[in-house]
Image: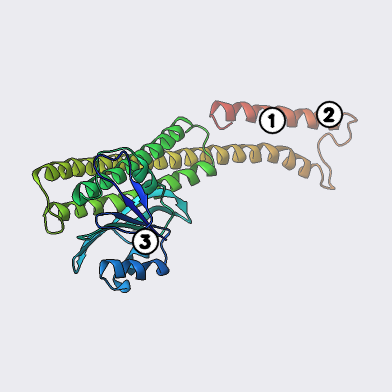
């Protein structure tokens, strides 16, 4: 459903409208194919030209359709079947600013409810502010993943399959964040060129700050990915070492259990054997077996096999 918002620089936050007016901000949350025809009519576009806005896997890019600029971005969100980023399309029309997301977007509601000096009439400043908000969300989510990884590093001594699963999940999250941040930098470069929006000196400075923020988020994301790979290698070494110790222990136990098995097998044969006529033969055999096992245990301990 289309929602209409309007704000002047004197207003505290965006005000909801019942119908569109020139200079307002139009937002479509959980957009579907039914929402596109009325929006296309309002923007003098064909509905098919807006179909990419509904693609949950659309990559960030910029394109122009008639007199409307479409800026495809991604922002971090809660997981949805392995998808940790969501599509957010920003449309800059001479009369309206439009945002479309095929998911439920808490980010946009936070943006509309926050206090600021923005005005829906100032498209470029509003665009930069929204992109700053997206970058801040990426940074916050990357730090959250980093905290999870640091917690796993502290618990490295006791590693199990759940830790491996959590580490793999964190790596996938960061990879998706990186795949959203890198194209976003390209989008900002395109916007900076001035081909898609009118930029003033103040806007240029804000976009440069935004570019630096995106690069910093990319760097933090890259550092965290390296930490995860290093931690994964450490996990592999720990697993390999634990497996080696287990194999040594099982081998030593097998040898120890084989000693009484061999002796019992020999004395189970139906032939003449030593001590066969002695009444204390069983005790002699048990004693000799115990001494042999004890000697083997001491030897294995000395070799650190047990």
The image quadrant that residue 222 belongs to is top left
Which of the marked residues, 2 or 1, is nearer the chain's N terminus? 2
Q: Could you tell me how far apart the alpha carbons at marks 3 and 2 are, in whole angstroms?
A: 77 Å
CB under 8 Å between callouts 3 and 2?
no
Q: Could you tell me how far apart the alpha carbons at marks 3 and 1 are, in whole angstroms?
A: 68 Å
The image quadrant that residue 53 belongs to is bottom left
Which of the marked residues, 3 or 1, is nearer the chain's N terminus? 3
Kindly state the secondary structure of the residue where label 1 is placed.
helix
Rendering coords of residue 225 (x, y %): 34, 43
Q: Quadrant of the N terminus?
A: bottom left
Kindly identify which residue carries mark 2: 283
Q: Is residue 44 left or right of residue 241?
A: left
Kindly state the secondary structure of the residue where label 3 is placed.
loop
CB under 8 Å between callouts 2 and 1?
no
Kindly identify which residue carries mark 3: 57
Q: Is residue 208 above or below residue 84?
A: above
Give neighbour class at mark 3: few <14, some 14-19, many 20+ (Cα, 10 Å): few
Q: Is residue 13 left or right of residue 274?
A: left
Residue shown at 19% from the left, 69% from the top: 66
Q: Could you tell me how far apart the alpha carbons at marks 2 and 1 are, in whole angstroms?
A: 14 Å
Q: Nearer the viewer, residue 74 or 147?
A: 74
Kindly identify which residue carries mark 1: 292
């Amino acid at each position: 459903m289309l929602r209409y918002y309007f704000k002047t620089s004197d207003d505290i936050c965006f005000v909801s409208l019942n119908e569109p007016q020139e200079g307002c901000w139009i937002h479509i949350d959980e957009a579907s194919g039914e929402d596109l025809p009325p929006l296309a009519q309002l923007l003098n576009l064909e509905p098919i030209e807006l179909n990419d806005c509904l693609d949950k896997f659309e990559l960030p890019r910029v394109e122009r359709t008639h007199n409307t600029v479409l800026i495809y971005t991604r922002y971090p969100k809660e997981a949805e079947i392995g998808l940790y980023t969501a599509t957010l399309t920003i449309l800059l029309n001479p009369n309206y600013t439009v945002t479309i997301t095929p998911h439920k977007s808490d980010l946009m509601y936070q943006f509309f409810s926050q206090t600021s000096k923005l005005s829906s009439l100032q498209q470029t400043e509003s665009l930069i502010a929204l992109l700053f908000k997206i970058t801040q969300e990426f940074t916050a989510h990357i730090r959250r993943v980093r905290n999870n990884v640091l917690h796993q590093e502290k618990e490295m001594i006791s590693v199990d399959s759940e830790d491996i699963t959590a580490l793999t999940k964190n790596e996938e999250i960061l990879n998706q964040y990186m795949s959203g941040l890198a194209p976003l930098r390209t989008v900002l470069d395109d916007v900076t060129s001035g081909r898609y929006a009118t930029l003033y000196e103040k806007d240029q400075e804000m976009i440069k700050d935004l570019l630096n923020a995106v690069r910093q988020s990319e760097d933090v994301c890259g550092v965290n990915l390296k930490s995860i790979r290093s931690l994964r290698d450490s996990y592999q070494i720990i697993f390999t070492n634990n497996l080696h110790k287990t194999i040594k222990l099982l081998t030593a136990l097998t040898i120890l259990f084989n000693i009484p098995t061999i002796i019992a097998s020999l004395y189970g044969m139906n032939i003449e054997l030593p001590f066969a006529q002695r009444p204390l033969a069983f005790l002699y055999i048990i004693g000799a077996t115990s001494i042999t096992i004890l000697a083997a245990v001491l030897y294995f301990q000395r070799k650190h096999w047990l």
